[in-house]
Image (spheres, helix red, strand yellow):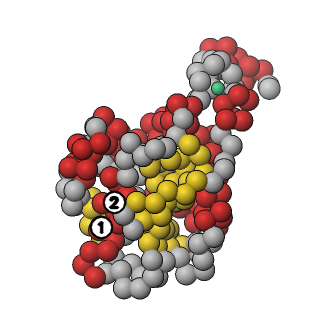
Amino acid sequence: MNSLAELSQLLFPSRCFGCQKLGPSICSACRSSWHPHYYRTKFDNLTVHSSLLYTPTASKIILAAKEQGIKGADELIIDAIIHAIEKSKIDTTLARLVPVPSSTSSQRRRGRSFIVDLVTKISARTGIQMLDCLQLSRRVLDQSGLHRDERATNLAGAFRITSQARGELILIDDVVTTGATLREALRAVNSQGFHAAGSVSAVTACVAQPLR
Ligand SMILES: [Zn+2]
């Protein structure tokens, strides 16, 4: 570490974005708890492929990426999503990655569309094209403060599809908890007869088990 970096550490000590322990970045304990495996969840007609369980540490890492824009946290999520895509055995030659949008107010607060940003990088690394075809058609609340039933109501009919979606579609989100968001994304993709052929699956970095 050079003296400027040392001085900056002294004045603005950084903390592990998993557990808040003082340190230059993520601590080794949190880093080793973020170890991608492979989980497969099925609901309705959707199979969701994920890399990690949604533990309290995983949730803090996701928040650090989403709400604080910490690049190291972004990288962990990107790696986890790519890992799950590889493990899923989905034929990706004609597949498109479809980012699942978050509320307009959270996009404004974060200064970016978190998932679109991540999927852009995932697309560049994997060579799988992105199809940013899902949009919010009305105002929704941030899902995080809502209970299961409220989440479904909050999102019912909230997504619309903005361009033709053909072939294999892979919905991409950071985490699946109740499944409400992915259900709504699936409904939108399958509506309007836009999705002519192929199938829809989903990949997330984390999965809450059981879905709650
Ligand atoms: Zn830590």
Q: Position of residue 140 (x, y in %)?
A: 23, 48
Would you say residue 77 is visible in this rendering?
A: no
Neighbour tally class for label 1: few under 14, some 14-19, many 20 plus, Cα within 10 Å: some
CB at disc 1 and ligand 1 closer than 8 Å? no
Tell me whether circle 1 and circle 2 mark residues in contact (CB < 8 Å). Answer: yes
Ligand 1 quarter of the rendering: top right
In terms of secondary structure, where does tag 1 sit? Answer: helix
Task: Give the Cα separation between the discs numbered 1 and 2.
Answer: 6 Å
Q: Quadrant of residue 108?
A: top left
Left of 42 or right of it: where is 89? right
Q: Which residue does the numbered mark 2 point to in the structure image?
A: 183
Q: Which residue does the numbered mark 1 point to in the structure image?
A: 187
User: Which residue is at a point 42% across and 65% down the rendered structure image?
Assistant: 46
In terms of secondary structure, where does tag 2 sit? Answer: helix
Q: Quadrant of residue 138?
A: bottom left
* Amino acid type, label 2: Arg
Q: Nearer the viewer, residue 109 or 193?
A: 193
Q: Nearer the viewer, residue 162 or 1?
A: 162
Pick the quarter of the image with the N terminus. Answer: top right
User: Which residue is at a point 42% across and 46% down the rendered structure image?
Assistant: 211
Please tell me whether residue 203 is drawn above or below residue 66 in the rendered image. below
Q: Nearer the viewer, residue 198 or 81?
A: 198
Would you say residue 24 is visible in this rendering?
A: yes
User: Which residue is at a point 56% across and 43% down the rendered structure image?
Assistant: 53
